[in-house]
Image (tube, rainbow, N blue to C red):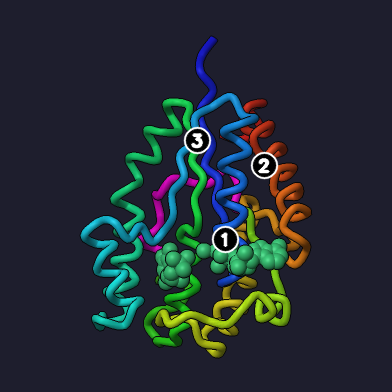
Amino acid sequence: MATKRGKLIVFEGLDRSGKSTQCARLVEYLRQNGSTDVKHLRFPDRTTPIGQMINNYLAGSSQQEDHVIHLLFSANRWELAQTIESAIAGGTTVVVDRYYYSGCVYSAAKQNPSLDLAWCRHPEIGLPRPDICLFLDINAEDAANRGGYGNERYEKQDMQDRVRGLFGEMRIHEDEKDDIVVIDAGKDIETVEKCVQEAVRVAIERVDSGDRP
Ligand code: ADP
Ligand code: 2DT
Ligand code: MG
């Protein structure tokens, strides 16, 4: 029998929605209960030369023009695109902490007139398509209760408010909505984890049964 292809599973959401927590838990769960190898990635991947430029920008130790940093974030995904494709083709499931959805909304939230969501989406076209994007949905109050912002560039209230609004737009966009499952991330960690597992189970079944290419 042919090996089943791996799946591409993405976590998205605002800062402190629980992405990194749930990503790590899902990786662990799939490693123990799934029948495939699992690769855990996060974007930005700060380990590559491009990732280091992004890290310096986020830390505030370097400046970049808005379009340039947008394209660097995108390039940081493209430098792993082939690795993701090969992993999936070889039967390995890839779980990713942030993807192009963050790429689009954080750049568009800068309110640069020539950097709207549509412009931001272009360089991402052709990247491996997620089998499911788990959007961890949380309200501002619950997120605030999880602690203050750190010192990175985008961790400011007005920016976060605009990011929230743009994520809302992206979630219902015709090109994205079929891939996105909204999870109530305001619940306790174990409850969210169960919802994630169930949504992923359904997505995996859909791919394996041929309902999704
Ligand atoms: P993100 O990666 O989306 O920024 P994290 O997973 O780092 O979020 O979580 C942010 C903080 O909130 C961490 O301190 C984490 O332990 C805590 N946290 C994560 N999920 C929950 C939850 N469901 N309920 C309460 N606290 C949570
Ligand atoms: P973390 O705190 O999750 O490391 O994110 N970002 C992320 C962008 O602006 N564009 C992108 O393409 C991606 C993937 C979101 C670091 C910050 O980088 C932002 C928060
Ligand atoms: Mg995180």
In the image, residue 100 above or below residue 112 = above
Callout 2: SS:
helix
View extreme (top): residue:
1
Q: Which of marks 1 and 3 is nearer the N terminus?
A: 1
Give the amino acid at mark 3.
Val
Check if residue 179 falls in the magenta segment: no
Mark 2 neighbour class, 10 Å CA radius: few under 14, some 14 to 19, many 20 or more: many
Mark 1 neighbour class, 10 Å CA radius: few under 14, some 14 to 19, many 20 or more: many
Query: Quick one: 77 or 35, which is closer to the camera?
Result: 35
Callout 3: SS:
strand
Image quarter of the C terminus: top right
Q: Which of marks 2 and 3 is nearer the N terminus?
A: 3
The answer to which image quadrant residue 63 occupies is bottom left
Q: Tell me how far mark 1 sits from mark 3, CA to CA.
A: 18 Å
Task: Note whether ligand 1 is within 8 Å of mark 1.
Answer: no
Q: Name the residue under label 3.
A: 38
Q: Tell me how far mark 1 sits from mark 2, CA to CA.
A: 14 Å
Residue found at x 42% / y 76%: 107
In the image, residue 64 above or below residue 77 = below
User: Percent x, y for residue 82?
Assistant: 32, 40
Q: Residue 12 carries which label?
A: 1
Mark 3 neighbour class, 10 Å CA radius: few under 14, some 14 to 19, many 20 or more: many
Q: Is residue 57 left or right of residue 116?
A: left
Q: Give the range drawn in magenta.
A: 122-133
Q: Mark 2 points at which residue?
A: 200
Q: Is residue 27 left or right of residue 107?
A: right
User: Percent x, y for residue 103?
Assistant: 44, 66
Check if residue 123 falls in the magenta segment: yes
Q: Tell me how far mark 2 sits from mark 3, CA to CA.
A: 14 Å
Task: Note whether ligand 1 is within 8 Å of mark 3.
Answer: no
